[in-house]
Image: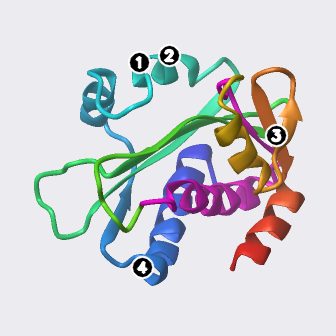
Amino acid sequence: MNFDQVVSSSISDFQVLMDSLSPSLAVGPISDQDFIVLSRGYGRINWDYVISKHSPNDSFDFGFKLKDINCHSGVLLGAFLSSFILKNETLEIYGIEHFGNYSVLEGKMFLYSLFACLIFMKKLDGKYIKLVDVEEDNHALRNYYHQFGFVEDGRQDLIISLDALEKHLRMKE
């Protein structure tokens, strides 16, 4: 499989999982129109910055959006943006956010994103997942990530091996 096929297959497999976890959510790739919406201040995080960070040289993008399966307006309920760095077999996550008060995603967007990462990384035999530019002074957020097994990697990043992530996700089931 080429990289685009891996991304497409991962999104499809993630949709199958989401059908069992939250059947009201549809998973899809982030479109150019979605990037425009995100860059115009949609949500709480600075998506302009996130979009500028992803796609470093020698990497491939992996991202997805979540929408209400019954909503035809295309309103984003969640977004995830990352890049797979070939040389160190690491998926660098730049942005994860759920939007609005959609109760199905409340407190679950990060967990669902980790499931998607696991699906994607297994297809590539990847080694690590890194959260990039996590706010240094946001101790509550950093502690939340530690609950999933992430460890500090420098001043602003957190990292976990794929094996450790899989063990932590099995414990959360």
Residue flagged by tag 1: what amino acid is it? Asp
Q: Secondary structure at mark 4?
A: helix
- The residue pinned by badge 1 equals 48
Residue flagged by tag 2: what amino acid is it? Ser
**Neighbour class for label 2 at 10 Å: few (<14), some, many (≥20)?**
few
The image shows residue 123 at horizontal and vertical percentages of 71, 59
Which span is picked out in magenta?
106-135
Residue flagged by tag 3: what amino acid is it? Ile
CA gap, disc 3 to disc 1?
23 Å
- The residue pinned by badge 4 equals 19
N-term-proximal mark, 3 vs 4: 4
The numbered mark at residue 52 is 2
Q: Can I make out residue 49 in this image?
A: yes
Q: Is residue 80 left or right of residue 2?
A: left
State the residue in front, 158 or 32: 158
Q: Residue furthest bottom?
A: 20
CA gap, disc 2 to disc 3?
21 Å
In magenta segment, residue 133 = yes
State the residue in front, 46 or 54: 46
Q: Is residue 105 left or right of residue 171?
A: left
